[in-house]
Amino acid sequence: MRRLVKELLFFLCKRIFREEVNAVAVIYVTLIVKGKKTFDQVPERIQAQVRELLSDLDVLELAE
């Protein structure tokens, strides 16, 4: 799990610097991966971005 979180943070940092990513979406993705939040708890206005980030991490099943 710790390795996954490290990889997640590295991936998200690369993504942030490559294009504009909502910082709140990144926070929600981190919390979802750690099991602290569920996708249903993500505000509707950023759900698409969170879903895309989860897909990029190959953990799209966390958005279901």
Image (cartoon, helix red, strand yellow):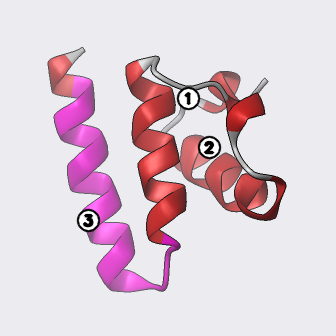
The reply to whether discs 1 and 2 touch (Cβ–Cβ < 8 Å) is no
Label 3 and label 1: CA atoms lie apart by 17 Å
| Stretch of the chain drawn in magenta | 4-22
Is 9 a magenta residue?
yes
The reply to whether discs 3 and 2 touch (Cβ–Cβ < 8 Å) is no
- Dot 3 falls on a residue whose secondary structure is helix
Q: Is residue 10 left or right of residue 35?
A: left
Q: Is residue 29 left or right of residue 15?
A: right
Q: Position of residue 51 (x, y in %)?
A: 69, 47
The amino acid at mark 1 is: Val
Count of marks, rendered view = 3
Say which of 52 and 21 sits in front.
Answer: 21
Disc 3 crowd rating (10 Å Cα; few below 14, some 14-19, many 20+) is few
Q: Position of residue 53 (x, y in %)?
A: 56, 52
Which residue does the image show at 34% across and 58% down from the upper left? 12
Quarter of the image where one finds residue 40: top right
Which residue has dot 3 on it?
13
- Dot 1 falls on a residue whose secondary structure is loop
Which residue has dot 2 on it?
55
Label 1 and label 2: CA atoms lie apart by 6 Å
Quarter of the image where one finds residue 25: bottom right
Which residue does the image show at 63% across and 52% down from the upper left? 50
